[in-house]
Amino acid sequence: MTEKGPALQESTFSYCFSCENCTNVCPVVINYEKPEQVLDLLPHQIMRSLGLGLEELALGSNMLWDCVTCYQCQEHCPQNVKITDIFYELKNKVSKDCFYSTKSDEII
Ligand code: SF4
Ligand code: SF4
């Protein structure tokens, strides 16, 4: 289970107006003929999911884990949404959850 709460880069995802710039400049997305079939959610859809409170959906998307952290999306966002930083934060949440769940298994 993921921790709810702080940050997500100060909730800048709420400024997203779905222009799709982030998705159009992403080198990972460009790599596939039908990226939505491989990556589940595209960068702009991940921001949209967060805006709708569907964080678990974003966490399960292959896009999050295939991201190469190039910052192209963040640099091209007209709304200054901190997309790459948000991706980092989401991945860190999952890593922490895995770490603590492994630790508690060891204790038991
Ligand atoms: S570039 Fe920014 S405003 Fe446009 S869809 Fe992506 S996150 Fe939203
Ligand atoms: S940081 Fe990740 S999501 Fe953004 S453009 Fe680069 S690969 Fe795509």
Image: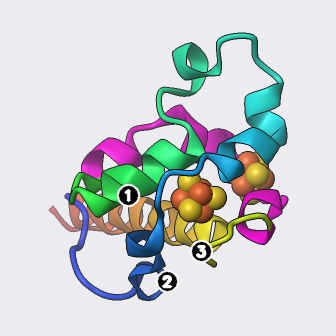
Q: List x then y, in percent, for residue 99.
A: 41, 65
* Label 3 within 8 A of ligand 1 by Cβ: yes
Q: Is 16 a magenta residue? A: no
What label sits on residue 10 in the rendered view?
none
- Upstream in the sequence, badge 1 or badge 3? 3
Q: How many marks?
A: 3
Q: Residues within 10 Å of mark 2 (few under 14, many from 20)?
A: some
Q: Name the residue under label 3.
A: 79
Q: Mark 2 points at which residue?
A: 9
Report the quarter where the N terminus lies. Answer: bottom left
The amino acid beneath tag 2 is Gln
- Upstream in the sequence, badge 3 or badge 2? 2
- Disc 3 to disc 2, how far (Cα)? 13 Å
Q: Foreground: 46 or 107?
A: 46
Q: Name the residue under label 1.
A: 98
Q: Is 74 a magenta residue? A: yes
Q: Quadrant of residue 66?
A: top right
Q: Which of marks 3 and 2 is in front?
A: 3
Q: List x then y, in percent, for residue 97.
A: 33, 64
- Disc 1 to disc 3, how far (Cα)? 33 Å
Q: Foreground: 76 or 31?
A: 76
